Amino acid sequence: MSLLSLIAVFLIEQLQPLHYRRIVAEPLSAWADFIESRLNAGEYRHGVIAWCVAALLPVLLLAGLYAFLYSLNPLLGWALNVGALYLTMGFRQFSHHYTEIQLALRLGDLPRARALLSEWQGRSAEGLGSQDIARLSIEQALAASHRHVFAVLLWFVLLPGPCGAVLYRISAVVYERWRTRDAAEQNNFSAFSRHIFGMIDWLPLRVTASAFAIVGDFEDAVYCWRTQADQWPDRDLGIVLASGAGALGVQLGMPLVDGVEVTDRAALGLGDPADVDFMQSAVGLVWRATVLWMVLLFLLGLASLVG
């Protein structure tokens, strides 16, 4: 059922792309802000209660709905799975910006490429050269493929029905929203959401990095993972980026020069500097990892049928 749900979501996404920000991100962000505004008293225990209300309660309600629909007809449960996957995962969440940036770089239109990257990242890209734009775009795409495809898919497989996919998506949104507010208010409210999301994302990060290594340059991917991930500011995400860079044979990270300011960033990967051709190679890496997932799901389904 997992493989059929995944195939159905990919087909629906191609026919009717989801406006993720308007339909998913903004409502979930509003929900997280609402819970935070009612329960944030600045202490750790308040963060525990708030996370349970914001993330765990919707998942439990969804689990009950799935069990009810499945008891009526398994096809109803499958339809709920497809709907939940369609809302929580998908390539369209990042492929549009990535493709447009790639096209702009091929045409030599640096101003448009900078504008597209700024819109995607949510921060200025003024003064960046073509290699910087390609490097940042590949990093963003590798991270987004983990957050919007592979991590969601793994939790969808691990928990019954749509519970895993929804748990990951809500937990990620809650973590991002509350972390931003706590940085400004300097309290301990978001500590639990940070800890629990770190636990939820621990296995998916390593599965994504392993998939990149298997379908790319395995030796370099593992070497970069072991030696470079700790140097990235976000060590967890550094695992995915270092493995992806090594699998591609491209240099990611490294300092960025924006006008007179220099942003210090650790070096990731081995090989040649990033360019528009490596952007296409990154697309191939993500798709090969996706095919690997589908093959594994097929084999798991076949094993369950034989059993």
Image: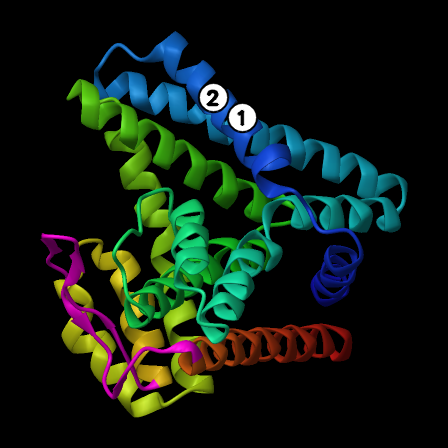
**Between residues 306 and 214, which one lies in front from this camera angle?**
214
* Residue 154 on the magenta span: no
- State the residue position of label 2: 53
- For image coordinates 41% across by 32% down, the residue present is 174
On the rendered image, what quadrant is the N terminus found in? bottom right
- Residue 149: percent from left, percent from top: 54, 59
- For image coordinates 51% across by 21% down, the residue present is 31
On the rendered image, what quadrant is the C terminus found in? bottom right
- State the residue position of label 1: 57
Q: Is residue 50 above or below residue 225?
A: above
- Residue 186: percent from left, percent from top: 15, 22
- Residue 188: percent from left, percent from top: 19, 23
Q: Which mark is residue 197?
A: none
- The local crowd at label 1, few if under 14, some if 14 to 19, many if 20 or more residues have their Cα within 10 Å, is few
When asked about the image quadrant of residue 271, the answer is bottom left
Indicate the amino acid at tag 1. Leu
On the question of residue 90 being in view, the answer is no
| Range covered by the magenta-colored residues | 249-276
Q: Is residue 125 above or below residue 7?
A: above
- For image coordinates 22% across by 53% down, the residue present is 234
**Dot 1: what SS?**
helix
Report how far apart the C-alphas of labels 1 and 2 lie in the structure. Answer: 5 Å
- Side (left or right) of 139 relative to 62: left
Q: Are marks 1 and 2 in contact (CB under 8 Å)?
A: yes
Q: How many marks?
A: 2
When asked about the image quadrant of residue 292, the answer is bottom right
Indicate the amino acid at tag 2. Val
On the question of residue 63 being in view, the answer is yes
**Dot 2: what SS?**
helix
Q: Is residue 51 above or below residue 15?
A: above
